[in-house]
Image (cartoon, helix red, strand yellow):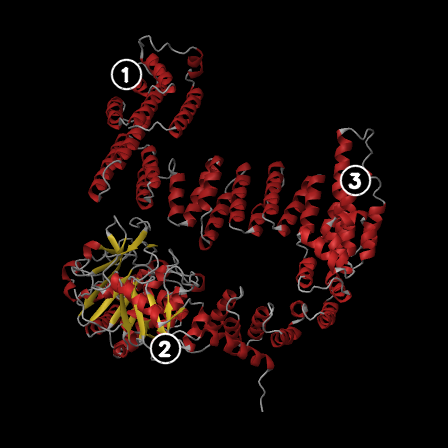
């Protein structure tokens, strides 16, 4: 029974919509026909009437009547122009397929081909129908081989009827690709290229086959040529080339660059965008930016830079995003680009660049004539830009340790709305907390008590572990200082500790010597948190000191949760000093003593590598 | 006097406590089903048990082909270090397992001693990996590498098990001169083999490799176990069948191959194949039609699919059952100079261990020859489907549960099995 499920109806409706579009483009008066629907009860007289009646019948799911109409229209032999005949053939293929009347399709299309042996639409339908008939055959090798040879014979007949036409090679290759018979598609396309004297008309199929065969150099070459010939192929090329394995990517890059050098105009931009998107997909942020960086600036190029910059931001490739926004802003001069540059630079840890970009925006706004009416769009935009720029300036200054300057920016900011004022004050407070100055942080940000993250940080600096625990548990902060501090606070029941406060202060200002001293002092006072404190110190200590510290943790606290890390780090430190033979038993002890530690798979992997690199029993030459 | 550091004392005490708490069982069962943490190193564990003089059992089809080892501290230690999952079981639990084995398509095979293993491998590292060297090194199984001089000196007699991988025994260097004739490693390879041929008084490299192939054939005939992969399978057979025929192109010996090569091949002497067609063109990177996939001939290349392992009766056909022990039944295929073997050229009596349904080729075959036996596995690297010249070697620590590599390691342990009369 033919399928009548809703999915099938939806597909049918979609097909009809596509045909209607094709018809419209081709100038077939389908809209007019709809405006005056044929009265299907009246007998149709001409092939054109039969066609449009069949279309209407198909539209109302009267497939048997529609099939009859299409067949009569096609069998009339004359009276339909080329576009109408195409519509009739495709319509008949659709409804016959719906009704399971594939043999009828072959018969009707066969008659069309007798009259017009070069008709590409008819040949295509015959090929598809023969394939569908073959797919219904029993899945034995003999039956499948027989079905294959029938389809192949139809392809050969098409080639013979239209010897210089790429369509048979293209359609047959596509069909084979759908069946995942890449090698056979390859053969067909090679034959086509030979007969046609080139790849015109079959280039995208050639490119697709090369990609599926893993011939990435040729695939890159053909796809980039296809994009040059038709920029609409860009997405298909992207999809196909994205699968290139790392070993084949250089050849794809080289092919696209080579094609780009032979290209002018906007196609250069399209090819560059293709390469940049491939690089992004391959996780090569630098490559993505380099693919477009050197293009001569013009509007379409600046748009492309902006697109790449946004994608780099999305991938959190902040350094590259900063470079992309910097180039974009240099050329465009747009305030929005400068602000994006400042944000990306801050995320990349480049506070100086962030400060420079945000300051430029602030200065530009200050030097611009004040809008006469603050409620007009220019005024609103200027206010918005200023409120975006000021927190960036303050945060950049705070990161650079220029807290006094940040203070003065906040003081001179003038009237800001509550949300903007809060953002600026918070940025300054974070700066003071990073400087270990809890008092000035609280002064800079009056709403600090309402902000769990900063409140917790502030409490830690003062040694108030009870408040810190409550606030930071809610905050879910990813700030490294707070993450490190929380692991210590969680290990002690104390409500208050000046010693742990000193550790957090040292962590905040990133003073290695102070961290080590503070951790040692705090460990002496808090036996329960001592392994965590000593582990923090060992992580921070210079290599020469760290090894002794890891050993000390292992000796004093062999059953603590920190011991596996200490054992692994001790082994690593020994390996790093080049003493593989001594490191191997240390790795083994780590695995044997802490077999349930999450670090064990890592230790096993490193031990394997060390054993491979260290001479010992195993492989020997005769 | 040297003092033991305090931390070592602390750790030793901890270890002693840990081991003491576990030391109550009599056997270690090494499951090889999905619950195994590191399938590949489990073979190394079994090998270690045999190497130390212990007795092991291979429980065919039981929990993925589990191993039963003695519960001794050194094996527990190695299992922990290697991440191999082991279950300590008592005699009672073992008796229950044996009942289950007796009732189903399962059997227990005793492994007697660690086989002496040799890998036929060039002395300088070629720019491609060797799956067996990788597998044995990763699993921690000892092996010796041998090369032409050792083979011609009769050293094969010292080993139970010999592995061949990528070598072209027709002496045509896998026709790599088509693409690599100017690369330093290829030039060095040609010079090395030509010098070896001269040393042994042989006219050229094809003559050298045929002499090596003949020694390998004799090794199997006398009772040796041969495991070959990739191009070594096809080229060994061509070299044996073509012992008296010029089947090498002009690049190797300066003369075209014999026009009537196909007719003059003596397939009665080969292990696995018969009636194959020798590829006459020196410009096509294929040796014959034995390989079903022809990866290096673009117009003939066939796409990769998946191959399924056959099931055998563990009690009636223990040898093929051993060779297909795996925790997965279907594996993704992978290319090699020889990827697969056309069914049409298999000798009668060859056991097909794995193949791709609906295709004219098979992947994994086995047979007896004289007093010995052989196993051929097509393809180059089970975890790198398109391993190319210059690709980095596969890091097996990323594939500790590789079903493809397990097939290789099955072959390593197979010669350790105590022979018992076959019922079929």
**Do the residues at pointers 2 and 3 share their chain?**
yes
Q: Who is closer to the viewer here, A314 or B387?
A: A314
**Do the residues at pointers 2 and 1 share their chain?**
yes
Q: Name the residue under label 2.
A: A621
Q: Position of residue B228 (x, y in %)?
A: 28, 65
Rounded to the nearest angstrom, the CA distance separating label 3 from label 1 is 77 Å
Q: Dot 3 falls on which chain?
A: A
Considering only vertical position in the picture, is B139 above or below A328?
Answer: below
Considering only vertical position in the picture, is A117 above or below A213?
Answer: above
Q: Quadrant of residue A503?
A: bottom right
Label number found at residue A4? none
Tell me the element at label 1: helix
Considering only vertical position in the picture, is A403 above or below B218?
Answer: above
Other residues around mark 1 within 10 Å, as few (<14) / some (14–19) / many (≥20): some
Q: Position of residue A52 (x, y in %)?
A: 36, 15
Can residue B281 be seen here? The reply is no
Could you tell me if the residues under marks 3 and 1 are in contact, i.e. CB atoms within 8 Å?
no
């Amino acid at each position: 029974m033919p399928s009548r499920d809703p999915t099938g109806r939806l597909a049918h409706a979609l097909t009809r919509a596509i045909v209607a579009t094709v018809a419209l483009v081709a100038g077939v008066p389908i809209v007019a026909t709809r405006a005056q629907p044929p009265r299907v009860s009246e007998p149709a007289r001409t092939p054109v009437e039969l066609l449009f009646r069949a279309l209407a019948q198909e539209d109302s799911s009267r497939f048997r009547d529609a099939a009859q109409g299409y067949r009569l229209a096609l069998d009339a032999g004359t009276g339909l122009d080329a576009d109408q005949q195409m519509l009739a053939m495709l319509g008949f293929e659709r409804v016959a397929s719906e009704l399971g009347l594939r043999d009828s399709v072959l018969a009707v299309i066969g008659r069309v081909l007798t009259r017009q042996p070069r008709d590409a639409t008819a040949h295509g339908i015959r090929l598809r129908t023969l394939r569908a008939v073959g797919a219904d055959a029993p899945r034995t090798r003999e039956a499948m081989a027989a079905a294959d040879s029938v389809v192949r014979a139809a392809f050969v007949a098409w080639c013979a009827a239209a010897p210089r036409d790429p369509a048979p090679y293209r359609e047959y290759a596509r069909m084979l690709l759908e069946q995942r018979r890449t090698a056979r598609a390859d053969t067909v396309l090679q034959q086509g290229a030979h007969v046609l004297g080139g790849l015109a008309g079959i280039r995208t199929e050639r490119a697709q086959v090369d990609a599926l065969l893993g011939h990435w150099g040729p695939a890159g070459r053909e796809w980039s040529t296809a994009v040059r010939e038709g920029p609409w192929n860009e997405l298909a090329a992207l999809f196909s080339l994205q699968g290139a394995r790392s070993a084949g990517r250089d050849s794809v890059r080289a092919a696209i660059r080579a094609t780009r050098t032979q290209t002018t105009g906007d196609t250069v931009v399209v090819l560059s965008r293709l390469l940049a998107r491939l690089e992004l997909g391959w996780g090569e942020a630098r490559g993505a930016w380099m693919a477009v960086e050197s293009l001569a600036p013009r509007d379409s190029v600046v748009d492309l830079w902006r697109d790449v910059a946004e994608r780099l931001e999305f991938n959190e490739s902040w350094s590259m995003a900063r470079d992309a926004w910097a180039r974009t802003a240099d050329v465009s001069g747009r305030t929005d680009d400068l602000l994006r540059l400042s944000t990306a630079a801050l995320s990349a840890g480049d506070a100086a660049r962030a400060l420079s970009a945000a300051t430029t925006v602030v200065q530009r706004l200050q030097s611009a004539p004040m809008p006469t009416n603050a409620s007009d769009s220019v005024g609103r935009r200027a206010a918005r830009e200023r409120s975006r720029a000021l927190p960036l300036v303050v945060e950049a200054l705070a990161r650079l340790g220029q807290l006094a300057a940040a203070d003065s920016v906040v003081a001179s900011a003038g009237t800001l709305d509550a949300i903007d004022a809060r953002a600026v004050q918070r940025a300054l407070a974070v700066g003071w907390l990073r400087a270990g100055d809890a008092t000035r942080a609280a002064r800079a940000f009056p709403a600090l008590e309402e902000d769990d993250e900063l409140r917790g940080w502030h409490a830690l600096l003062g040694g108030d572990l009870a408040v810190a625990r409550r606030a930071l548990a809610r905050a879910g902060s990813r700030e490294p200082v707070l993450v490190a501090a929380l692991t210590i606070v969680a290990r002690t029941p104390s409500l208050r500790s000046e010693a742990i406060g000193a550790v957090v202060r040292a962590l905040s200002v990133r003073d290695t010597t102070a961290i080590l001293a503070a951790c040692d002092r705090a460990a002496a006072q808090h036996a329960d948190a001592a392994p965590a404190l000593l582990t923090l110190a060992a992580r921070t200590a210079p290599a020469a000191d760290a090894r002794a510290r890891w050993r000390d943790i292992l000796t004093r606290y062999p059953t603590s949760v920190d011991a596996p890390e200490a054992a692994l780090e001790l082994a690593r430190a020994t390996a790093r000093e080049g003493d593989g033979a001594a490191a191997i038993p240390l790795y083994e002890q780590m695995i044997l003593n802490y077999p349930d530690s999450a670090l064990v798979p890592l230790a096993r992997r490193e031990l394997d590598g060390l054993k491979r690199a260290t001479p010992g029993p195993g492989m020997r030459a005769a | 006097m040297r003092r033991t550091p305090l931390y070592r004392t602390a750790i030793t005490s901890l270890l002693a406590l840990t081991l003491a708490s576990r030391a109550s069982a009599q056997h270690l069962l090494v499951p090889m089903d999905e619950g195994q943490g590191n399938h590949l190193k489990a073979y190394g564990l079994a090998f270690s048990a045999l190497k130390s003089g212990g007795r092991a059992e291979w429980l065919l089809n039981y929990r993925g082909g589990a191993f039963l080892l003695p519960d001794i501290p050194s094996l527990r230690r190695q299992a922990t270090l290697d991440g191999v999952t082991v279950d300590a079981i008592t005699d009672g639990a073992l008796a229950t397992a044996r009942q289950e084995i007796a009732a189903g398509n399962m059997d227990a095979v005793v492994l007697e001693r660690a086989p002496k293993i040799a890998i036929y491998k060039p002395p300088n590292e070629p720019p491609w990996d060797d799956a067996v060297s990788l597998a044995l090194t990763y699993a921690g199984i000892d092996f010796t590498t041998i090369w032409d001089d050792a083979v011609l000196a009769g050293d094969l007699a010292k080993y139970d098990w010999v592995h061949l991988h990528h070598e072209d025994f027709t002496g045509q260097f896998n026709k790599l001169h088509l693409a690599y004739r100017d690369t330093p490693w290829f030039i060095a390879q040609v010079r090395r083999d030509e010098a070896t041929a001269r040393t042994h008084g042989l006219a050229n490299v094809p003559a050298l490799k045929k002499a090596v192939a003949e020694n390998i054939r004799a090794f199997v005939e006398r009772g040796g176990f041969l495991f070959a992969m990739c191009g070594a399978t096809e080229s060994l057979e061509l070299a044996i069948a073509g012992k008296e025929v010029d089947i090498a192109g002009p690049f190797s010996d300066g003369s075209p191959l014999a026009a009537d090569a196909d007719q003059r091949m003596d397939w009665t002497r080969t292990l696995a194949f018969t009636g194959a067609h020798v590829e006459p063109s020196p410009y096509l990177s294929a040796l014959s039609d034995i390989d079903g996939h022809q990866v290096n001939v673009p117009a003939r290349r066939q796409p990769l699919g998946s191959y399924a392992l056959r099931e055998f009766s563990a009690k009636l056909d223990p040898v093929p059952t051993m060779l297909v022990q795996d925790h997965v039944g279907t594996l993704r295929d992978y290319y090699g100079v020889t990827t697969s073997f056309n069914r049409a050229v298999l000798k009668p009596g060859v056991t097909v261990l794995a193949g791709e349904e609906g295709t004219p080729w098979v992947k994994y075959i086995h047979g007896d020859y004289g007093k010995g036996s052989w196993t051929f596995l097509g393809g180059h690297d089970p975890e790198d489907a398109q391993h190319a010249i210059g690709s980095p070697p596969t890091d097996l620590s990323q594939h500790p549960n590789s079903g493809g590599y397990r097939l290789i390691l099955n072959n390593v342990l197979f010669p350790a099995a105590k022979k018992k009369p076959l019922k079929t």
